[in-house]
Image (cartoon, helix red, strand yellow):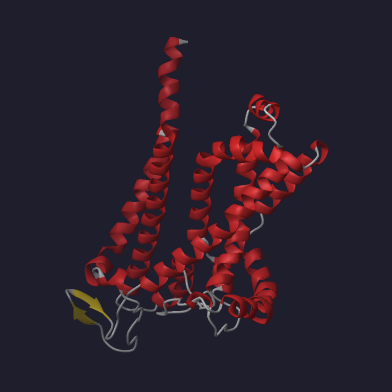
Amino acid sequence: MRHAGGPFRIFVAMFAAVIPLSIGALIAFLFYNAWPAIHFNGLDFLTQSSWNLGNQYGDAVTVRGAEVMPGASFGILFLIVGTLASSLIALLLAIPIGLGAAVFLAEAVPARLRQPASLLVELLASVPSVVFGLWGYVVLIPFASKHLYPFLSKVLGFIPFFAPPTRNGYGLLTSGIVLALMVVPLITANMREAVMTTPRALREAGLATGATRFEVMRHIVLPRLRLPLIGVSTLALGRALGETMAVLMVSGNAINILPHRVYSSISTMAAFMVSQLDSALQDPSGMAVNSITEIGLILLLISMLVNGIARLLVSRISTL
């Protein structure tokens, strides 16, 4: 067995190395192809909302050492704001719903129905995102334009973020709702498992002291869910940040417009890359494709930053 340990360790290490090597290769690929855009755009790429491919029928000119089409400029602040805002709205809606559903499945559903109900939640997680987008386009957008947005502007209109005009149903809040529906099953399935890992002895000890089931849940079970909730929320945020087709169908595809209200049309980084790639390929200078690659690099860095912050929070809470 001792002699078999070495080759086996090397064998599994080769498979384990695939993941970090893949991430390293992906970052290197993005950085190499985005470098001309990084050099040309500078920090304006992050601080300006000025995506313009320039005159595609003119001759390329040299600006700051790079060949671009006349009048071309690339700034994606509106994409960063749209991506982060829609993802945060999705988490604000999805976390309470997902956590509540998880507690309900683990504590309130009869034992014989618990497994089928959990299976339904897991099946919902496997629905393709384009189906959520189609549902949002056919059902949610008309409902939002006729009922939800007018109601919100009437009740919460004194808050500038909810003030009219309510527009046509596409936009930031619609994107957030669709994203929330997509990540709720992920949160529910994982948090249900976390709830069920609470030792029965702790629950029975709480009940033995005279606490109600609600008090046991509030004071014993829920405090144990902080770490799993941070981890699951990070996974959900990662999916929301990178979602493409569903957002593309309901966001309104705004360009160079910062959202000032929940009804504003937006565009996210992932959806914008898909929608603009065909136009970018027509750019003779190639700078538009380089800039789209830079968007992908920034989106990847944001996702890694979110995971890093989540790990930091987990380590801090673990030491408390």
Q: Which of 134 and 59 is in front in this view?
A: 134
Image height of 166 relative to 315, above or below: below
**Res. 183 visible in picture:** no
Q: Where is residue 218 in the image (x, y as percent from the top left)?
A: 62, 41
Left-right relation of 272 to 175: left
Which residue is the extreme one toward the right? Answer: 112
Left-right relation of 132 to 49: right
Quarter of the rendering occupied by the C terminus: top left
Looking at the image, which residue is at 31% across and 75% down?
A: 48
Q: Nearer the viewer, residue 64 or 29?
A: 64
**Res. 21 visible in picture:** yes
Q: Position of residue 76 (x, y in %)?
A: 36, 72
Looking at the image, which residue is at 38% across and 46% down?
A: 308
Which residue is the extreme one toward the left? Answer: 65
Q: Where is residue 245 in the image (x, y as percent from the top left)?
A: 56, 66
Looking at the image, which residue is at 43% across and 78% down?
A: 279
Q: Which of 131 and 105 is in front in this view?
A: 105
Q: Which of 75 and 163 is in front in this view?
A: 163
Which residue is the extreme one toward the top? Answer: 2
Q: Position of residue 132 (x, y in %)?
A: 65, 64
